[in-house]
Image (cartoon, rainbow, N blue to C red):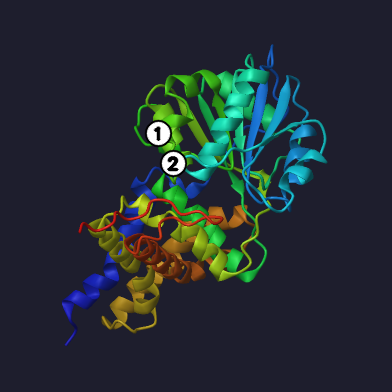
Amino acid sequence: MLEPWLLALAAAPVAIWIGLIRFRGGFWRADQFLPEGSAELARWPGVVAVIPARNEAATIGDTVSSLLAQDYPGGLDVIVIDDSSDDGTAQAAGKAGRLTVIAGKPLQSGWTGKLWAVKQGLEAADKMHGDAPFILLTDADILHDPGSVRRLVAKAERDGLDLVSLMVLLRCRGFWERLLIPAFVFFFQKLYPFPWVNDPKRPMAAAAGGCMLARRQALREIGGIEAIQDRLIDDCALAAAIKKRGAIWLGLTDKVESRRPYETLGEVWTMVSRTAFEQLGHSLPALTGACLAMIVTYMVPPLAAVGVLGGGWAGVGFGLVAWAGLMPLAFGPTLRLYRLPAAWALTLPLAAFLYTLMTVTSAVRHWRGEGGAWKGRHYGQAPAADG
């Protein structure tokens, strides 16, 4: 006799995917891009690029060179903050051309390393280029195409935006990158639908830390980078603070790229487990709910499709509709951005399973007091027990 609950379990993902596709802001379309073509403004405001760098000798030179080669008609200055590197980051940056390299001060308590470096970069920008209206916060592994700054500034000026951010094209070469990187971008869009982020009438705010152009006045009005000094997910925290007073925009790009490799599963695991539990507010109920949602949405469909869950032919049919029909429909635009075939969408349940385990790992690390470890530092540690 067919168990009704097995059929209901197989059918649930179909309902979930229809709801996501229909009612989640069209996140899956992956259609938020800066306008193409050569933008023109009557006056091009000055921009200061601030790049925090800790042990980034392998990529910092290309990042700086890509900024110095911009076709930007206005003033563009570059400041690199060497955050206690021991691999020659400062020397590699200095070889790229005309820029300012600052030796970072020892990390102060209450700050994350990246934001402490950004603070020092902003202070230097105030002293040396105080009249520049825009600050470009970018990572030390980002390669900007020649029109990058021009497009960012044109978008900000024409639409009156206080923050313009790009989810840069992440490296996607080896097996693990192909399995996990497009899925990561897809999950980020689902969590923060870009059309909702870009709607000034909605409170949702998000940004991608690799490339953020911020209006200097907006940074001052939120209290400076000090307002988010201890936040691990600093890009979204900055976007939330700025959107409370002005408009923001977040989009995709196939022109600005990250050169940071994630060649092994362990490298992706470390990156995600650093902040995943932070995203859930260190809440056990939120962790439980998130894991159950991932299981039902992504893992039940293939299990139902191959008959593992039971539910008869109806269960198999529901599984196939979700796994081979709705998932490829939703994941397809992101796969095209990363030049992967549509059939690659069938791997999404495996990626979701691994990301679920990474999230659990993040919680365990927090409870053990290991915090959000990154480049030899630990943040967000669980409070010590009394007694």
Sort mark 2 into few (<14), some (14-19) or many (20+) by Cα contacts within 10 Å: few
Count every numbered label the image shows and give the total: 2
Instruction: Look at the image and tell me whether residue 199 can be seen.
Output: no
Spatial separation of the CA atoms under disc 1 and disc 2: 23 Å
Q: Residue furthest top?
A: 42
Q: Is residue 302 left or right of residue 208?
A: left
Q: Is residue 306 left or right of residue 376?
A: left
Determine which residue is flagged by label 1: 240
Residue drawn at x 44%, y 30% as measured from the top left? 226
Q: Is residue 90 left or right of residue 211?
A: right
Q: Are marks 1 and 2 in contact (CB under 8 Å)?
A: no
State the SS at label 1: helix
Instruction: Look at the image and tell me whether residue 102 can be seen.
Output: yes
State the SS at label 2: loop
Quarter of the figure with residue 144: top right
Is residue 231 or residue 331 the one in the foreground?
A: 231
Residue drawn at x 63%, y 25% as measured from the top left? 124
4 to 348, vertically: above or below: below
Residue drawn at x 32%, y 64% as measured from the top left? 291
Amino acid type of the residue tagged 1 in the rendering: Ala
Quadrant of the drawing holding the C terminus: bottom left
Question: Of the numbered discs in the image, which one, if any, rests on residue 109?
Answer: 2
- Residue 257 at x, y percent in the picture: 67, 47
307 to 372, vertically: above or below: below
